[in-house]
Image (cartoon, rainbow, N blue to C red):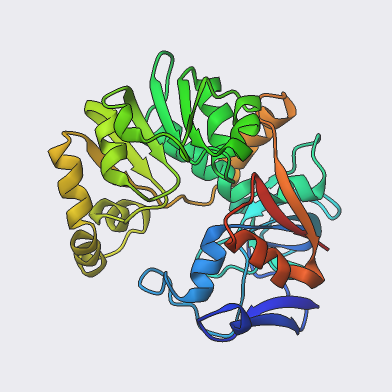
Amino acid sequence: MRAFVLNRYGGPDRARLTDLRRPSPKRGQLLIQVRAAGLNPVDYKIRQGMLRAINRYPLPAIMGNELAGEVVQLGAGASGYSKGDRVYARVAKERLGAFAEFACVETALVAPMPHSLSFEQAAGVPLAGLTAMQCLRDELGAAEGMKLLITGGAGGVGCFAIPLAKWLGATVTTTASPRGEALVRELGADEVIDYTTDSLTNHQRRFDAALDLVGSDMEAVFGSVAKGGKVVSVAAMPEPQTARVDLERDWKLQSLFWLISYRLRAQAKAAEVSYRYKFMHPSGEELRELSQLIDAGTLPVKIDRSIPFEQIDQAFAYLEAGRAKGKVVVKF
C-alpha cells in the first residue's frame, strides 16, 4: 500500500510517499480502506518535531490524524461493524496512520459516516469537529445567551465552532479577514471583526468567554472577556492542566507546561479571567453526535480544497501557507 511516512523530524522533505505492507487489524481494531484523509496544522507541527515533548513517535511513522473509508476486515473481538460499512475516525494520537491506503483503528474511535456526506467531506470532520465540540460544550459551557468570541473563525476548527456555538444558543462574534467574512457569516456569525483593520483592544470586556483558534495577541483576547470569564485556546501555549487532564501525564510535563505558559497565565490573571489550553481526545461516541447534527443540517461541512493523495506534499504546502478557509483533504 502507499503511505505518507515521516522519516525524520524537520521540513517538508522529511516525509514522503512510500510503499509498505498492508497492515492486519489487532484485537478490537478495524482495518479501514481509506478513501480520504483530512490535513490539520497539528500534522505539520508533528512533522517539524514541535510536539516531541508530548508524543515522541518511533520513526519512520505513517502520518495523519483523521480519515474516512470503508471497513474491509474486523480484528478479533471487534464488533458493531461489518465489511463495507462507511466510517470515519480521529485515529489514536499515539500511533497516527491516517495518510495511507489502509489503516487499523480501534472500534471505540470509529463512527458511521454521516449519510449526507461524501468520503472527502467526512474526512474533514473528526479532528476539527471534535475539537470544537469539546471546547465549546465541555470547557466553555456555551449556552443560551452567552456572548462568545471565536478568533480565526474561517479556519478548519472555526467552521465547526461557529455553527455549533449557535446551535448551543450563544451569540457569536468572530475575527476574520475580508476574504473570510462571507464564509463566517454564512456559518452563522452574528458579528465579524476584520482583524486587518480592527483590533480586539477596541472591544474591551465585551464577551463572556472566548475560544482562541489563532494563538497570537492573547493579551488582547484576555482583555476582551469580562472579569471572571474563561478563555480556551487550541493554538497558544499548553498549561499544567493540559498535561494532567488531557494527556494524563506526570509532574515532569506539568512542570514544563507551567514554565512555558507562565507569562500567558500571568496575563490572564491580570485580566481576571481563567485560561485553559485544550488537547482534544478521539471519541467514536462524540463522532456519532456530530453525524446526527450534520445529517440534520445543523452542522455544515466546509472543504476548502480536495487534492489527490499522490500530491499530498502540495496539500501540506497549501495548508502551511495559512490561507485555507475550511478543511484541506486528500482523496484516494
**In the figure, 310 relative to 315: above or below?**
below
| Quadrant housing residue 224 | top left
**In the figure, 312 relative to 276: above or below?**
below
Can the viewer see residue 98 in this picture?
no
Residue placed at 32% from the left, 38% from the top? Answer: 221
Image-based side of 131 in relation to 298, left or right: left
Q: Give residue 249's position: percent from left, percent from top.
A: 30, 63
325 and 308: which one is in front? 325
Q: Give residue 82's position: percent from left, percent from top.
A: 81, 51
Quadrant position of the C terminus in the picture: bottom right
Residue placed at 26% from the left, 54% from the top? Answer: 239
Residue placed at 78% from the left, 62% from the top? Answer: 34
Q: How many marks?
A: 0
318 and 252: which one is in front? 318
Residue placed at 65% from the left, 44% from the top? Answer: 326
Q: Give residue 66's position: percent from left, percent from top.
A: 64, 57
**In the figure, 224 relative to 65: above or below?**
above
Can the viewer see residue 287 in this picture?
yes
203 and 146: which one is in front? 203
